[in-house]
Image: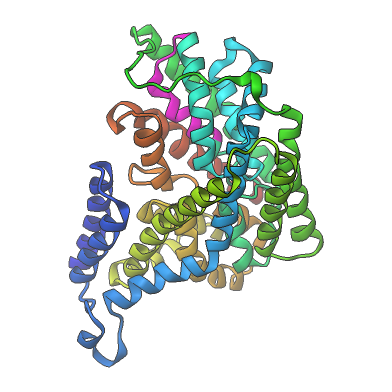
Amino acid sequence: MLSMAGLVGGLILLIFLTIRGMNILIAAPLCALLVALTSGIAILPPMAEGGQASFTVDYMTGFAGFLKDWFIVFLLGAMFGKVMEDSGAADSVAHWVVQKLGMRHAALAVILACAILTYGGVSVFVVAFSVFPMALSLFKEANLPRRFIPAALAFGSVTFTMTSAGSVEIQNFLPTSYLGTNHFAGWQVSIVVALFMATVGIFWFEKMMARAQANGEVFDVREGDPEEKNYDVLPNPMLGFVPLAVVLGTSFYFSVILDFGKSALVVALLGGLLSGILIYRKHFKNLGAALSVATLGALIAISNTCAVVGFGSIAKLTPAFQVALDYMTHLPGNELIGAAVAVSVIAALTGSASGGQAIALPLLAPHYLAEGVDPEALHRVVAISSGGLDSLPHNGYVVTTIRAICGETHQSAYLPVAALTVVIPFVGAILAIVLFLLGL
């Protein structure tokens, strides 16, 4: 009972501290310590009997394990995103999408611009930073409530693109290491689910904005808003699609044809990075400085994820976690339901889709594969499920996008974010399970 109270209390405290603005590198180990104390886990190795678990060792084992496995991917992804950003290629692609759709579909233009860049391999954080000034300008001209900008950025970046078949985001590649699949696993179902999430999400988003406008909400200009960018000096938008196509094509060849597993993602991002540098070499002010900034960004991004993975590493040692995991993996009905529930809960616990998968898959994959579950179906369900409850208020991307990039508060902006990035993917996971059960 105390273990369960500590586990739930630690999660609630982590969410609270994150919302209050505490650095996740401080909040996560602090909350993990609470979980350890309420479950009788030794704090230091000398306090552990017979080589049992200890807080300091196991927290850092989880932290360092994720760092070891994924730092190269985070680094290349950040550098590729920075090349696309610093050269103006990301702005060029996004601006081209906006021009094609026009002001009547301002919100849709922001969503699609984010979706194209994210699916092409640009980091979700870079996409948010790149598209925000354009979104601000569009929402201002269309007089749309600016508190909905974080929802538009998040919906286009971390839902129907991030976890779809063919996506080169880490959330779609993590299952390959444990299930022996590739990142196109379950592509038929993935297409249907992605179209469903995109269609329903856009419809719901526009309904929420229309309701807000009917209640008198308008765009509010604030002191310190960034100046509108000059889009006349950007590179050709068609050239902007070339590195994205290189990433997608290379990832397909090395993953599906050569079966390189997650190494295909390294090759794909490296290919995109080199092609971007080659194509835009005349557009950089200081390439070396840009890549240095990207390196720092990669360290921050992966450290934040490692911090919540460390929290999850302590959580999974507790009796409460083992009881909950046993319950979830033995739910009545199809095994895909248990997998979806387990991954969703662990992703919620860590506030990270990739962190949740990193903790859940080593425990779940052997169990469900031994039960004869189709690995391709399991891959797709795990990927989609991880992208739902991960977007609770303490999620690093959510906090950064709402507060640091858009200058909003959780109170004003989180509700539409939650509707589009928690509810829609959750329903999408249910749809995926139903389609797999129907044999699609």
| Front residue of this view, candidates 291 and 186 | 291
The image shows residue 388 at horizontal and vertical percentages of 46, 44
The image shows residue 126 at horizontal and vertical percentages of 52, 40
| Front residue of this view, candidates 433 and 120 | 120
Give left or right: position of 222 versus 245: left
50 magenta-colored: no
- Residue at left offset 58%, top offset 58%: 73
Give left or right: position of 54 versus 173: left
Q: Is residue 330 visible?
A: no
Picture quarter containing residue 278? Answer: top right
Give left or right: position of 436 versus 426: right
Q: Is residue 50 visible?
A: yes
- Residue at left offset 71%, top offset 34%: 240
Q: Is residue 407 above or below residue 387?
A: above
What coloring was used for the rendering?
Answer: rainbow
- Determine the residue located farthest toward the bottom in the rendered image: 50
Q: Quadrant of the N terminus?
A: bottom left
The image shows residue 129 at horizontal and vertical percentages of 49, 34
The image shows residue 115 at horizontal and vertical percentages of 61, 34
| Front residue of this view, candidates 405 and 314 | 405
Q: Is residue 248 above or below residue 207?
A: below
Picture quarter containing residue 183? Answer: bottom right
Q: Is residue 200 above or below residue 340?
A: above
Numbered range of the magenta stretch: 142-156
Picture quarter containing residue 307? Answer: bottom left
Give left or right: position of 260 versus 377: right
